[in-house]
Amino acid sequence: MTTGTEQLRWQNWARTESAQPVQVAHPRDLEHLVSIVRSRGGLRVRAIGAGHSFTGAAVTDGIQIRMDALNLLERVEPQPDGTTHVTVGAGIRLHALNRVLASCGLAMRNLGDIDRQTLAGAISTGTHGTGSRLGGLATQVVGVRLVTAQGEVVDASPTHRPELFEVARLGLGSVGILAAITLAAVPAFHLRAVEAPLPLDEVLERLDGPDNLVEGNDHFEFYWFPHTRRALTKSNNRTSADAGPRLHPVRGWVDDELLSNGVFAATNRLAAAAPALTPRINRIASRALSARDYTAPSPEVFASARRVRFREMEYAVPRERLREVLAEIDSWISASGVNVPFPLEVRFAAADDVWLSTAHGRPTAYVAVHQYLRLPYGRYFQAVERIMAQVDGRPHWGKLHWLGASRLGELYPRFADACAVRADADPDGAFSNEYLDRVLGPV
């Protein structure tokens, strides 16, 4: 246990949340984790990952558990359906998991756009990628091992304790501490990445119809620069390793480090210092975008480095309502006088049946709004949240929003079921905190 005051202070990546736990524990293995939970002495317990949630999901005033040592590969089991069940420690970071899977000739079928999170943190908050025929990371989970509030080790799956499994794989760590996770991995594959700047109106026209950008690609997303009518589109499709050009290392560094991080950081600092310049900055940035076409192993295409700190809110909306949502956001930005140097990110996902998934029961479009760390975000994000409310948008569990359990209960058909499982698994609120009590209700 760590007890020094300075060593106990914790802050998340976005600097939106901080904590001062009584103790910080670093379990060495499953047995050590069990002993920590059993000896908690009435203190509340929260496991943290990489601190990439923008919310207070990981905050605790009790015992903070850092899961970094529980990060090993346990089992690799080929399945008759062509997938392979891979069991790993829940504290493994996604970038490390990608390397482990690649060494076995495997990969995850879809990923988000960063890989710094722990696997447990990513699935528990509903992390997702893009692809109209694909679900979020939790849909790839086929088994979990967790430590309950009583210090018992429980395995759960779709066929063994399925209700507990549902809330364990996506439930903000509300029913136990994930110790290990079993994924349905697929054979490793390459993606051909085609990035192209296009007029926003053309992109919106091509979201449906015969030239459908969403259905016509394995993975499609786009970034729209506010104060402009320009977008950067990204289309990624499975291909053979030698089917397309490789990205030259110099070009990759220029695009991903110099432009996406170095120059972008400078333009955001300029926008913070002189907000009135933001529309001009965005127009220049959107016009400076250049096309790219390259082939690489899937993890290298899915994930990008994010070194410019920001705050983010993301909502899942019914896919057919996307265009009106973007039009409303555009109108508000134009009328409000708020300057937004960060592009909006738009992604897509298939409907799924995970109880607390933001894509539960409906084909989904995700709209993420960002604001630079040094700029105020409250007025902008709250305005967007009001727009999302008109289409029954669901907020990402790990990103900023102001909804509570009452409204969330109206948005999720299985919300009451999830809360009942939580109450049964943790009746005394050992794993709770202020954020969980707000979004799931007090136990």
Image (tube, helix red, strand yellow):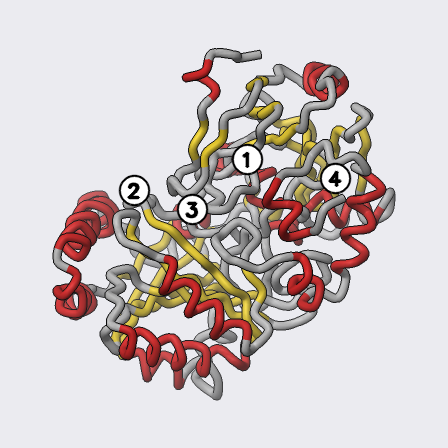
Q: Label 3, label 1: how many angstroms apart (C-alpha)?
A: 22 Å
Q: Label 4, label 3: how many angstroms apart (C-alpha)?
A: 26 Å
- The disc, 2 or 4, on the residue closer to the chain's N-terminal end is 4
Q: Label 4, label 1: how many angstroms apart (C-alpha)?
A: 16 Å
Amino acid type of the residue that numbered disc 1 sits on in the rendered structure: Val
- Front label number (2 vs 4): 4
Residue occupied by mark 3? 114
Where residue 63 sits: x, y (%)? Answer: 61, 23
- Front label number (2 vs 1): 1
Q: Residues within 10 Å of mark 3 (few under 14, many from 20)?
A: some
- Front label number (4 vs 1): 1
- Front label number (2 vs 3): 2
- The disc, 2 or 3, on the residue closer to the chain's N-terminal end is 3
On residue 307, the disc is 2
- Which quadrant of the rendered structure holds the N terminus? top right
- The disc, 2 or 1, on the residue closer to the chain's N-terminal end is 1
Label 2, secondary structure: give it: loop
Q: Which residue is drawn at 41% across and 48% down?
A: 303
- Which quadrant of the rendered structure holds the C terminus? top right
Q: Residues within 10 Å of mark 1 (few under 14, many from 20)?
A: many
Where residue 322 sits: x, y (%)? Answer: 48, 77
